[in-house]
Image (cartoon, rainbow, N blue to C red):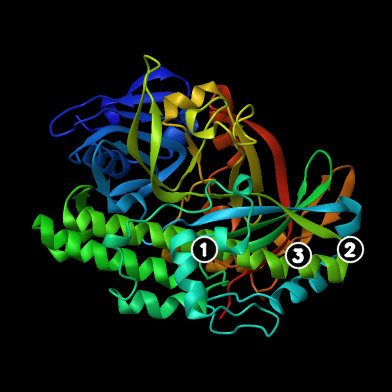
């Protein structure tokens, strides 16, 4: 019997894969019947393997889940004393930050020419792509400043702690040597403040209901995080006796020397990612002021590729500390969670920022009590249906139609009709178009029906910048 056939349905949005064979924990999957039908046996095989890691006590799949490596994307692994490197992957602390453009309404951004001017203004102020091209207006950082960021994230930038999932993750200085991985350290200074390529972006969005204007920035720890992750995948595989071809399955005990070393360097990459997003904010704010004469205020910032030590609230109401690995999943602490005590989000739960696709938009969620059943996690996006290579190959004949979709789409947002989603690329990236992603509203619907989170804002893109250099 296949793993998929062994699934047990608890509700129309909650399935369980019982323990079998080497599995140390059952797998809880939050999927509608339609989203379940989009999964295949390879995903469930990977989920069963992920549930077999030493030290694992729970594995949860969000409704955007799809096949990854080590742990499915959209997967949340909870462990006692083991760190699974695939739980952060290569882009450690990839995440998003939202700015709200105060004083702007849908009517103010309906003009296509103005939106194009804004795109050019952003491009002149921030580094897109790999970050080799740095506009003159971008801030420069000294090596000592970079060292401080690697240790304290957004705190040296003066960012309010309530605007971040966390300002920084504390680091064991005895285990950190920022010169240990030369390829990582060499990337840190030149790429600080850059967006990157792939699915990373800067996007202007409009709230469907009230017409408010927002800007979402999606990026991570850049080359510093990638080189750090790559180094420890190889080191972990060597320690565990795995062949290099299976290095992404490696894991580390938190109390062993390599585990302490990885944890320190992982956290430095996470700190870098948080600071990176906040550095980019400055250029976006300047562009809003120059083109729309509006101020952009940071609303919140959060990661969705990260391992964190958190307070776990158990079914009997007791609490304990553990490692929560969110590989393409977003933290979702509901009101009253012990780790929110003393913050401005204590009585509401913190915001969850969820990008979808460059056509179908994004959402801001707030966690509900049901989040305790999903390891205090929600999805990190809509979820990919088509791999990048396959998208570029198979959708090539549809390029013209897909370009027209972006150019001609008409939506009524906040009572205002807005035509088209303008971009900074000549053609719509096929590996990022709407056709390669699941339906975001179907994904969000599972969370709402299961009482995991509520949708507070449903936003749609009107201008999008992708990394191009």
Residue 439 sits above or below residue 183 on the image = above
Q: Secondary structure at mark 2?
A: loop
Residue 374 sits above or below residue 362 on the image = above
Between the residue at mark 2 and the residue at mark 1, the CA separation in whole angstroms equals: 27 Å
Residue 323 is situated, as x and y percent measured from the top left of the image, at 33, 40
Mark 2 or mark 3, which is nearer the start of the sequence? Answer: 2
Q: Nearer the viewer, mark 1 or mark 3?
A: 3
Q: Residues within 10 Å of mark 3 (few under 14, many from 20)?
A: many
Q: Nearer the viewer, residue 379 or 304?
A: 304
Mark 1 or mark 2, which is nearer the start of the sequence? Answer: 2
Quadrant of the frame with the C terminus: bottom right
Residue in view at x 36 percent, y 28 percent: 28
**Residue 431 disc label:** 1
Left or right placement of residue 32 versus residue 321 in this view: right
In this view of the protein, can residue 220 be seen by the observer?
no
In this view of the protein, can residue 440 be seen by the observer?
yes
Q: Residues within 10 Å of mark 2 (few under 14, many from 20)?
A: few
Q: Nearer the viewer, residue 439 or 315?
A: 315
Between the residue at mark 3 and the residue at mark 2, the CA separation in whole angstroms equals: 19 Å
Q: Nearer the viewer, residue 330 or 361?
A: 330
Residue in view at x 75 percent, y 54 percent: 297
Q: Nearer the viewer, mark 2 or mark 1?
A: 2
Q: Nearer the viewer, residue 78 or 454?
A: 78
Q: Which residue is mark 3?
A: 285
Left or right placement of residue 167 versus residue 245 in this view: right
Pointers 1 and 3 in contact (C-beta within 8 Å): no
Residue 440 is situated, as x and y percent measured from the top left of the image, at 59, 42
Q: Residues within 10 Å of mark 1 (few under 14, many from 20)?
A: many
**Residue 111 disc label:** 2
Left or right placement of residue 363 versus residue 271 in this view: right
Residue 286 is situated, as x and y percent measured from the top left of the image, at 78, 69
């Amino acid at each position: 019997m296949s793993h998929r056939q062994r699934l047990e349905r608890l509700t129309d949005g909650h399935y369980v894969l019982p323990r079998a064979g080497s599995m140390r924990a059952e797998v809880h999957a939050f999927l509608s019947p339609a989203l379940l039908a989009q999964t295949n046996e390879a995903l469930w095989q990977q989920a069963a393997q992920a549930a077999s890691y030493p030290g694992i006590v729970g594995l949860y799949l969000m409704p955007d889940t799809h096949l990854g490596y080590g742990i499915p994307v959209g997967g949340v692994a909870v462990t006692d004393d083991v760190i699974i490197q695939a739980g952060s992957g290569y882009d450690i602390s990839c995440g998003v930050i939202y700015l709200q453009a105060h004083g702007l309404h849908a009517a103010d951004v309906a003009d296509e020419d103005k939106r194009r001017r804004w795109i050019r203004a952003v491009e002149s102020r921030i580094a897109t792509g790999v970050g080799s091209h740095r506009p003159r207006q971008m801030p420069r950082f000294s090596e000592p400043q970079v060292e401080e960021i690697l240790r304290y994230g957004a705190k040296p930038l003066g960012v309010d702690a309530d605007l971040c999932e966390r300002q920084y993750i504390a680091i064991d200085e005895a285990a950190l040597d920022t010169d240990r991985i030369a390829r990582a350290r060499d990337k840190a200074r030149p790429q600080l403040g850059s967006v990157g390529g792939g699915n990373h972006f800067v996007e202007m969005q409009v709230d469907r209901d009230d017409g408010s204007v927002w800007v979402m920035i999606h990026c991570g720890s850049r080359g510093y995080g990638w080189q750090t992750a790559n180094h420890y995948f190889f080191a972990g595989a060597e320690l565990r006796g795995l062949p290099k071809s299976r290095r992404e399955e490696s894991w580390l005990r938190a109390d062993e020397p390599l585990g302490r070393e990885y944890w320190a360097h992982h956290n430095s990459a996470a700190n870098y990612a948080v600071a990176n997003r906040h550095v980019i904010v400055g250029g976006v704010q300047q562009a809003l002021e120059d083109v729309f004469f509006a101020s952009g205020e940071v609303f919140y910032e959060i990661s969705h590729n990260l391992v964190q030590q958190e307070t776990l609230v158990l079914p009997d109401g007791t609490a304990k500390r553990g490692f929560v690995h969110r590989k393409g999943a977003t933290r979702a602490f509901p009101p009253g969670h012990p780790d929110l005590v003393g913050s401005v989000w204590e009585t509401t739960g913190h915001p969850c920022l969820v990008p979808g696709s460059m056509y179908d938009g994004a959402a801001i969620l707030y966690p509900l009590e049901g989040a305790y059943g999903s390891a205090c996690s929600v999805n990190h996006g809509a979820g990919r249906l088509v791999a990048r290579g396959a998208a570029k190959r198979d959708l090539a004949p549809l390029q013209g139609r897909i370009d027209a979709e972006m150019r001609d789409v008409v939506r009524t947002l906040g009572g205002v009709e807005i035509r088209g989603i303008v971009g900074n690329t000549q053609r719509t990236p096929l590996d990022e178009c709407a056709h390669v992603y699941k339906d975001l509203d179907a994904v969000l619907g599972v969370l709402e029906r299961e009482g995991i989170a509520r949708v507070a804002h449903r936003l749609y893109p009107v201008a999008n910048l992708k990394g191009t250099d």
